[in-house]
Image (spheres, grey):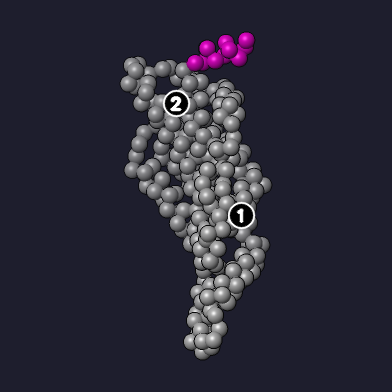
Amino acid sequence: MEIIRFIIGNSSTFLFVLVRTGAVIMTAPIFGAVNVPMQVKAGLSFVIALILTQITAHVPLPQGLVALVLSLLGEMLIGASIGLCIRFIFTGIEFAGQVASFQMGIGMASAYDPLNSAQVTVFGKMMSIFTLLIFLSVNGHLMVLMALSRSFEVIPPYGFHLSNSLIEGMVNFSKEIFLLAIKFSAPVMAILIFVNLALGIMARTVPQLNMFVVGFAVTITVGFVVMALSLPVFETAVIGVMDRMWYGIFELIRVM
């Protein structure tokens, strides 16, 4: 009963906090996964919003239906921006695995990804799982909640405003998908360029060899070896990317 009385007494603040929290939960990795039941997402959003309402300054409802709708849309944009920026990083690293798979010639070896409801290559799925484990090991899920809490300190309910800096920040985050794909797949791509060059020279000098069969085996083997050798530095690289990600998200919150 005390919870109900608290919600009724702070209904306006709770509404805005709940909308922003729900937007983060629905878009952020882990929390917003497709295989997480909607009831769990709704319950988690409710509990987190209930906690954050107690540390958020009380605000009245805007006057008029149009102002209320615009304010709620602003809260949704704040939450969705935080969640999507995190998801961009995960997508970029997964894309790197797909690029490496195509370079190795195993791009058709795909598997169903229940987290994104899409077909991904085996390497893409492997790198996605590794990134998810690293994200959890460095308390990334808690950092999501910290970023949400920080957003209420910087941007009070219905205090959102669209700016050029915000749009520029979102564009910069979205381009990280392609930059990370190239950076993380660079070792495999670089080595396979020389491997294909060597195979081309062998095809010219020893035409009796069936380079189509030999090339498949060589490129796949070399690709696996390079990926295995790069795994020890994979964690360090992902943690560095996540550190820059959090810095960028906090800057993005500041310009909202």
Residue 213 appearing in the image: yes
Q: Is residue 227 above or below residue 202?
A: above
Q: CA distance from mark 1 to mark 2?
A: 40 Å
Q: What residue is pinned by disc 2? A: 157
Tell whether 139 sits left or right of 110.
Answer: right
Q: Is residue 223 above or below residue 110?
A: below
**In percent of the image, x 37 and y 21: which residue is there?**
68
Classify the position of the N terminus by image quarter. Answer: top right
Q: Main secondary structure of the magenta part?
A: helix
Tag 1 near tag 2, CB within 8 Å: no
**In percent of the image, x 55 and y 63: which residue is there?**
106
The image position of residue 166, as x and y in percent, is: 38, 42
Count of residue discs? 2
Which of the two discs, 1 and 2, sits closer to the camera? 1
Quick one: 252 or 195, which is closer to the camera?
195
The image position of residue 190, as x and y in percent, is: 52, 71
Q: Amino acid at mark 1?
A: Met
Quick one: 95 or 173, which is closer to the camera?
95
Q: Is residue 138 magenta?
A: no
Neighbour tally class for label 1: few under 14, some 14-19, many 20 plus, Cα within 10 Å? some
Classify the position of the C terminus by image quarter. Answer: top left
Tell whether 161 sits left or right of 55.
Answer: left
Quick one: 37 or 238, which is closer to the camera?
37
The image position of residue 143, as x and y in percent, is: 59, 40
* Residue 126 tag number: 1
Q: Amino acid at mark 2?
A: Pro
**In percent of the image, x 60 and y 43: which residue is there?**
140
* Magenta residues (range): 1-11
Residue 226 appearing in the image: no
Tell whether 239 sits left or right of 193.
Answer: right
The image position of residue 198, as x and y in percent, is: 53, 81
